[in-house]
Image (cartoon, helix red, strand yellow):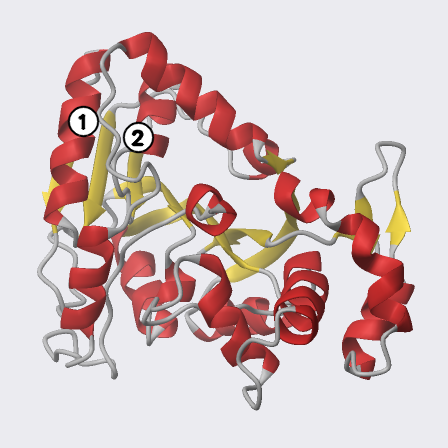
Amino acid sequence: MIKKILYKLQSSFSVINLDKQQSYDGIRDSKEYWTEHNVTLHHEFSTKEESLEYFHWRNDQYFNYIELMPVSGFDGKNVLDYGCGPGHDLIGFGTYSACKRLVGVDVSSSSIAESRSRLALHGINAETVVLDSGVITLPFEDATFDHIHSSGVLHHTPDPLAILKELKRVLKPGGSINVMVYNYDSLWVHLYVAYQRSLIEGLYQGESLRDQFRHSTDGEDCPISNCYRPAEWVALCGEAGFEAHFSGAAVSIFELSILDKRFAAIMNRKLPSESRGFLKSLTFDEHAAPKFQGNYAGIDACYQLKG
């Protein structure tokens, strides 16, 4: 199914308050869920070439993604991949940057094992750490990393603010963070969820649009899957002490494949006025990629953070 092919990541952890040693009861379920699920569907790569081909194929499923969440240009840097899953972006960093230190962390032991196997296939020297579920503290000293990469992770956590504060702790002064979280201002939300799944397929009646969204991305039973308007996420990052910039959104090829349903959706009287207004206001670039308020109207919203 397309939702299983296209989801990004994966696994994460958090706590319900800012006491770093407190645990969150629901995190055990998330750990178990993400140990079962990951971005490669637990595929075992047999060659370096197959692994690298998958890296490029997956990035090609999201128009503009690799430009917004780059893995090149980090030579001589200490880099942390927060929520590395089975090592997809670690392979990217290890192939296209000469990092001084490359570290991937995740709560899923199965994904970390697959990550280690894939790194060995490429001969990439990287550290991988299985995190304790429900404990927010990262096993690193203050100001350890020059750059932190987190793709498709924080929207799966109950308290992303607490995690952002911990990432700030381990980031060097003047360091950078690139984050991708799901975008509320997207075709996925207002065409796929609000129209196709809710009105055409009749799913999740009586639930809010955001609750309907949770079922649509990373499996029907995904414990947590949130989406944010850019202003919402920028404000959250500000609370954590970051200067945050919305760098743009990547549109999934799946979203483009259902774009022809846009006019039928607008004509449907049951479509919520918010979603109808969103679809009516779309503009298009020279590649026929949709934009909303000047930004691409895709599921993957990407941000640059500085401490």
Judge by depth and name the residue closer to the eye, 51 or 23: 51
Quick check: 289 left or right of 203?
A: right
Determine which quarter of the picture holds residue 133.
bottom left
Horizontal and vertical percent for residue 4?
42, 48
Relative to 271, is 199 on the left or the right? left
Mark 2: give few (<14), some (14-19) or many (20+) Cα within 10 Å.
Answer: many
Q: Is residue 103 above or below residue 268?
A: above
Q: Is residue 72 visible?
A: no
User: Helix, strand, or loop for circle 1?
Assistant: loop
Residue 66 at x, y = what percent?
55, 32
Disc count in the image? 2
* Within-10-Å neighbours for mark 1: few <14, some 14–19, many 20+: many
Front-lying residue, 23 or 9: 9
Q: Is residue 67 visible in this depiction of the protein?
A: yes
Q: Which residue shows up at 29% across the image and 48% down it?
A: 82
Give me the residue at 43% from left, 16% from top: 53
Q: Are marks 1 and 2 in contact (CB under 8 Å)?
A: yes
Please name whichever residue, 86 or 259, is drawn nearer the observer in this view of the structure: 259
Q: Which mark is residue 272?
A: none
- Element under label 2? helix
Question: For mark 2, what is the residue?
Answer: 90
Q: Amino acid at mark 1?
A: Ala
Residue annotated with mark 1 = 126
